[in-house]
Amino acid sequence: MNQYAVETESLHVNYGKTAVLWDISFKIPRGCIVGILGQNGAGKSTLFKAILGLIKPLSGKIDLLGGCRVSDVRQKIAYVPQRESIDWDFPITAEEVVLMGRYGRLGLFGRVRKADREAAANALDLVGMRLFAKRQISQLSGGQQQRLFIARALVQDADLFLLDEPFAGVDMATEKAIMELLKVQKQQGKTILVIHHDLSTVEEYFEWSILLNTRLIACGPLTEVFHRENLIRTFGKGQMLFDEAADSLAKSQSGFL
Amino acid sequence: MSLLDFFTDPVLRGPTWGTLFMCIASSLMGGVLFLKRRCLLGESLSHAAYPGIVAGVSLFALLFPEHDESAFFGMLAGAFATSFLGFKAIEWMEKKEKVRSDAALCFVLALFFGIGTVAASAMQSSLPSWRTKIHALMFGQAATMSDFHIALYAMLTSAVALFLFFGFRHLQAVLFDSDYAKTAGLPVRWIDWAIFWLFLFALILGIRSVGIVLMSGMAIAPAIAARQFTDRLQSFFCLSALFGALSGLAGNIISVMGTIALSKSGERLTLPTGPSIILIGAAIALLSLLFAPKRGWAFRICRIAAFRFRCLQENVLKAMWKKESYLFNEFQEIHRVVPLMLHAILWRLKQGGWIVKAKEQYILTADGRRKAASIVRLHRLWELYLASELGVSHEKIHLNAEEMEHILTPDIEERLTRLLANPKVDPHSQPIPERSFL
């Protein structure tokens, strides 16, 4: 058994006719908080979806939690989706969203047990949302909604956390509080991947980083990879020619060209 | 004929129980589709059943020409076949060809229904007696339902109820956040599969009593009504079933009574069941949209009016804070509202103990003075926040603060105070009333 939480090897992903990820190979050791940086459309969310097995890569290999396939370790991976992907008008209360973290291992006929309910109540407490347990989710503020989904991930007792922009639309106090919770998880040996936008807080939050711009710019300890040159490559426009070429390759592969 | 007869009479009980079970099943599955945001799928699939019904009945007529009482089975088989084909076509267009969902749904609806209509008119010459059976399915025909149909629909409804009961948690996760359900290792495929087949069964069996054209409305109307009343999934399904059952029962009874009344008056007309059921269902949905306590239109209007009224009261208080006493006419000059409204505002303020009237003069009480000061404080705090923290220009801040002063909660006020370090003057150099004084 190796010590890597996530390991990918020449991962390629196409979305219809556009190349989203191009030859991504990296290794992330267990027990660290990883910031995934890149501009819009750089393939950050797609990387998550590929890791989670929600989309099928064109080619390449993904190993999780020491060489396992995603289908064997599903209970061990907690996913916090982007806020926009949630139907906030859905008839569901805060409490039940958190309880959903336990749905991967329900009893016979999907009955929820008392232990599950208690775990959910504790997780709500942990994120400071006990008072809002009975609220319908659209009646929560942005920060509260995000904390709710963190609680759902916590209640799952996962070893690997994938958080897609957990700080979007969240106030600074909540952001810090979420970060504290994640640090506690890290100390228990869990690995946390966070898609992040705000470059000013990167050094404060993360110890490891993946810089992504369709292809992998860098992956490594923050001190080694988080410097000017890599950031220009990640956020600069020098890549446009590459993107164009990669696009036409994808089009050829899917028969549009 | 009493109400009980509808449930016990050998002739009447078929349509009554049949439509009742059918409506419960289809409104429950319609609720599922409603939450999946795929309401139009029902419309497309029920229309896609049409060519199958025509083909199924025709084949049946050719194979077993003397068993026309069992044509129901030919109809069922054909309806399933083409509905399923329609579904696959929609799925293929959406997923593989990236056709937009609404376009795919419309296309399948129009194409399949067109084929069905052409095929049905071809039957007119070759199988005229069988064609009337098909024609009845357009808007449904409940009157000819028998005990066999009761059993069939009861089975369907039990299957749906069992699925919702035992699959509730999984279904909830799949409907709410399907990606998450997949990552948690839930049997998403099975759930989707069960949803599709149960929905298709409910839809196609429902066509028998409500008809191709109206079936999807029957599935969705109860869900629209139920959503107005609850924020919990369990109660959403219970209410959907209840509203579905109500429209089924009432629609059926109205149709029977209406037909009897029409025949008494000598007309050879019938009041069809399908449209009656749909109209009741739509009426329930409409009333719910208008009058549901939380989300209903009427109550929202009331809340808006109450809010406006409160704003006006607070504005009057604020004006009085700046000047010792007011005459009624003076109010009228500043506040451009009809005199009756102004009387109402002043009466309400007097009732609340904020102002008193002495010799035609309106004067603030001590409580009123405190309340007015707190509104002014909110107004000026907000102005300062806009100007100093957000850099909004001075000409614009007043109007925005005029609105926000009615909205800001004590919690926000406290945070503003802390953020602005308990300020003493606003951007117009006016003093901000102290909290301690309030």
Image (tube, rainbow, N blue to C red):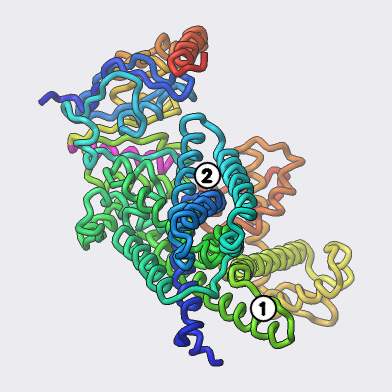
> Is A144 in front, or is B19?
B19
Identity of the amino acid at label 1?
Gly
Q: Residue at x 21, y 30 (%)?
A: A69
Q: Which mark is residue B270?
A: none
Q: Residue at x 41, y 43 (%)?
A: A174
Q: Do the residues indicated by labels 2 and 1 lie within the same chain of the protein?
A: yes
Asked whether the viewer can see residue A13, the reply is yes
C-alpha span from label 2 to label 1: 33 Å
Q: Which mark is residue B353?
A: 1
Q: Tell me where residue A133 appears, x and y as whole percent.
A: 37, 60
Q: Where is mark 2, residue-wise? A: B419
Q: Tell me where residue A165 appears, x and y as whole percent.
A: 42, 34
Quadrant position of residue B161: bottom left
Chain of residue at mark 1: B
The reply to whether dot 2 and dot 1 touch (C-beta < 8 Å) is no
> Is B14 in front, or is B297?
B14
**A187 is within the stretch colored magenta:** yes
Chain of residue at mark 2: B
Total numbered circles: 2
Q: Which residues are magenta?
A: A172-188
Name above or below for residue A235 compared with residue A143: above
